[in-house]
Image (cartoon, helix red, strand yellow):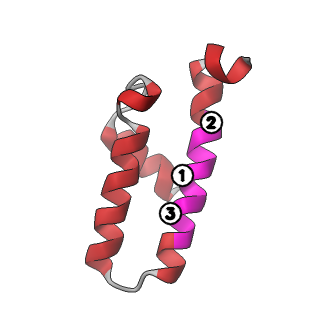
Amino acid sequence: KKYFEDANFRLTQEVEAYRNQYKFIDKNIKDRNTKFRMLHKIAGDLSGDLYGKIITYNEAIKLIKN
């Protein structure tokens, strides 16, 4: 219930998941262009309509890579 009602809580949960995705990408993908495209995609997802555009694309990049 909290996940759906509290945007900040939802963001913290999703950032953790997206960070883990990026850690996997960073560890397993050697081509930097592919890494960049994958980061661009997941940052776009995190900052997009799916989560109500609660952060910007640049904020998503920073949070995912941090």
* Distance (Cα) linking label 2 and label 1: 10 Å
Residue nearest the viewer, comparing 16 with 1:
1
Does the magenta run of residues contain 31?
no
> What amino acid is found at the position of numbered circle 1 in the picture?
Tyr
How crowded pointer 3 is (Cα within 10 Å; few <14, some 14-19, many 20+) is rated as: some
Question: Which numbered disc covers residue 12?
Answer: 2
Label 3, secondary structure: give it.
helix
Q: Name the residue under label 3.
A: 22
Residue nearest the viewer, comparing 14 with 1:
1
Residue at the extreme top = 5
Q: Name the residue under label 1.
A: 18
The image shows residue 61, relative to residue 34, as above or below, that is above
Secondary structure character of the magenta stretch overall: helix
Question: Which numbered disc covers residue 9?
Answer: none
Residue nearest the viewer, comparing 62 with 48:
48
Magenta-colored span = 12-24
> What amino acid is found at the position of numbered circle 2 in the picture?
Thr
**Mark closest to the chain's N terminus, 2 or 1:** 2
